[in-house]
Image (cartoon, rainbow, N blue to C red):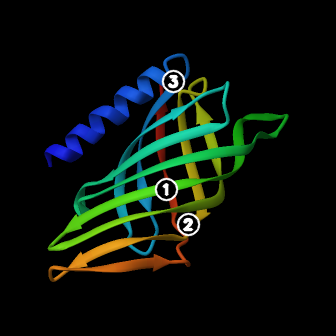
Amino acid sequence: MKVICAVLFLFFQTLFCVFSKTGIGFQGGYDFSSRPAWFVSVTARSDLYPWVVSMNAYPQKNMISVFADDYFVNETFTPLSKNIDYYLFWGVSAGFLSDDGLIEASTGCRFGGGLDFFFLQRHVSFFCRGAWNPYFGAKKTDGNWKGLARPLSFPCSAGVRVWF
């Protein structure tokens, strides 16, 4: 637990240093993946760079995941509705799970897209997104380490973000 707290501290410190003149958002939502669960997250996004960095915590699963996504398309849906954006991204992911004797560490790539619905002068957004996220790693069950490969992982999520 001390290692996870140290990693979280360094992650947030890096976010605030790198993205000090940009948006920091906190979000909550539901992940409709092969392991569905509620999550809370912190997200950093910049108008200067297309990258969005997120760290999700899934309390009921003792899991943490980190995403760094390049929004290579990030546009307003129509000129008449400036509060709806769509985006396409590619990126990388990493995750760590520790639950009932199972330990799992993984990394992978992501390709996906989503919609943002903004309110209150773009300080609150409802989002939905989906991705193809193949990953590999290692898992430990019953004291033995084994390889892990999931080429068919399609996490989808929806939730609310509050931007500062």
Q: Which residue is mark 1?
A: 93
Q: Earlier in the sequence, mark 2 or mark 3?
A: 3
Q: Nearer the viewer, residue 126 or 59?
A: 59
Q: What kind of residue is marked 3?
A: Phe
Q: Is residue 28 left or right of residue 91?
A: left
Q: Earlier in the sequence, mark 1 or mark 3?
A: 3
Report the residue at 55% width, 66% height from top.
133
Mark 3: few/some/many CA within 10 Å (<14, 14-19, 20+):
some
Q: Secondary structure at mark 2?
A: loop
Q: Secondary structure at mark 1?
A: strand
Q: What kind of residue is marked 2?
A: Asn
Q: Is residue 38 above or below residue 9?
A: below
Q: What kind of residue is marked 1?
A: Ser
Give percent across and percent down for residue 58.
31, 56
Q: Is residue 155 left or right of residue 106?
A: right
How far is mark 1 from mark 2, CA to CA? 8 Å
Mark 2: few/some/many CA within 10 Å (<14, 14-19, 20+):
many
Mark sitting on residue 133: 2
Give percent across and percent down for residue 126.
54, 44
Q: Which residue is mark 3?
A: 19
Give percent across and percent down for residue 59.
24, 55
How far is mark 2 from mark 3, CA to CA? 25 Å
Q: Are marks 1 and 2 in contact (CB under 8 Å)?
A: yes
Q: Is residue 44 above or below residue 54?
A: above
Report the residue at 70% width, 40% height from top.
84
Q: Earlier in the sequence, mark 1 or mark 2?
A: 1
Q: Is residue 138 above or below residue 49?
A: below
